[in-house]
Image (cartoon, grey):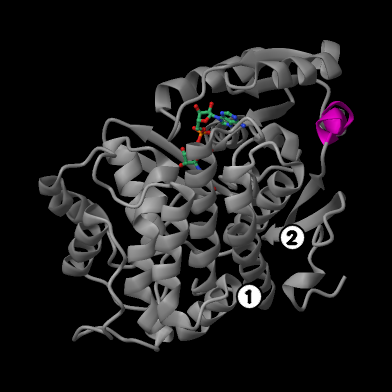
Amino acid sequence: MVLTTGSHLPGADGAPFTFSALVTDGRAVRVVFGRGRIAEVGPLARSLGSRVVLLAGRHAPDVAREVDAALGDAVVGRIEETAQHVPVDAAARAVAAAREARADVVVSVGGGSATGLAKVIARDVGLPVLAVPTTYAGSEMTPVWGETDQHGKRTGRDVRVLPRIAVYDPDLTASMPAALTAASGMNALAHALESLYAPDATPLSLSVAEEAIRTLARALPVAVRRPADPAGRAEALRGAWLAGWALGGTTMGLHHTLAHVLGGRYGLPHAAVHSALLPHVAAFTAPAAREAFGRAARALGVSGPDAVAPALYELAADLGAPTSLAGLGPEPEDLDGVAALADVSGVGAPRLVDRDDVVRILRAAYRGGTPERPRGTPPGSSPGKPEQVRATERTVEP
Ligand code: NAD
């Protein structure tokens, strides 16, 4: 298949599809997408192994039972304990359970927290993962794991944690309440936008990210207002898949660095933090990444790069997603501390960023409101010269 524009990407016609999506280091995820395809999890899991540890978030007992029944005797362990940012203690218990059960494959059903726990098992025990996402987090398409202890979040990039198979059944997302749909959708938009200006973006990742933004912007209002509409749910989930795919092969930057510190160190809800931060990081970045933001503008149907940040804010407000960090946890006096923890020195960004910039961004995100129109670049920064700033090897979790 020749992938030149977003319109050639699988599922654009709304039909179910199976597709091998190349992510990174020559590794692909087999993507199985369509209503009712949860029924295929049994045979797909058996294609990876014969002793399954089944990890399912508590919100989906019926789905977990259905998958459990389909796998029958192959299920040698069950884990229900999932939490945001993957607490190390819970991860250690899950790893021990998988080892004890002599499992040879992990099946996870749930949001990014369930997928994240499956990834830690993959990292420590070396098992392949089949992921069934039930939110728009997109973790099933990335080789990034994360874990949190009392000091904050540790993350890493390891191709072994990239799931082998991802089964996307839009019907499983219909139970998401409006608030989760909206925030998780903004999380997916953040993935796509940040991959557009990543230093290692490729023609393919750019097409995929642009199509993700276009799809999410169109579908999320439908998914929020008509949660049971299968077409809206399918389109939103396809957008989230594309956003995760784009991000999986590229390096995360400033936006994810800040979300990571706020989420991991302060224990804030992941998707909500993304939603509140996104317009403000976008306003900061837009002056230095005209081409990337031009693509985003095209996808959002707005006039140009500078209109992207306000449009993202308006979309979040329209969806009822968080538009301010106020009320999520941190107090205004915490923001300097967050900025101090956020190591932005080597962040892969089109524009140099220092601690004062970070404080300004965080304060703007705390205040909420329409992001200010980008005012050009402060002294010392390098707009339009992304080659001066290179991503380092460090990894940030989405
Ligand atoms: P989550 O998985 O914690 O889910 C949020 C809540 O919604 C949970 O209570 C869950 O049980 C519930 N839920 C999930 N699906 C539901 C559904 N269909 N209907 C009703 N309730 C449902 O949150 P998330 O935002 O999906 O994921 C956040 C986590 O994922 C964070 O730890 C984040 O760091 C990680 N993440 C990692 C990556 C990566 O590439 N490594 C990418 C995105 C997110």
Q: For numbered disc 1, what is the local secondary structure?
A: loop
Label placed on residue 35? none
Badge 2: residue crowd in 10 Å (few <14, some 14–19, many ≥20): some
Query: Which portion, as a residue range, is magenta?
Result: 36-44
Q: For numbered disc 2, what is the local secondary structure?
A: strand
Tell how many labels.
Answer: 2
Label placed on residue 202? 1
- Residue drawn at point x = 50 percent, y = 83 percent: 303
Q: Is residue 82 above or below residue 322?
A: above
In x, y percent, where is residue 235? 71, 52
- Residue drawn at point x = 29 percent, y = 39 percent: 328
Q: Is the CB of mark 1 within 8 Å of ligand 1?
A: no
**Viewed as shown, does residue 274 lie left or right of 247?**
left
Q: Is the CB of mark 2 within 8 Å of ligand 1?
A: no
Farthest residue in the left direction? 333
Q: Nearer the viewer, residue 279 or 5?
A: 279
Q: Nearer the viewer, residue 224 or 244?
A: 224
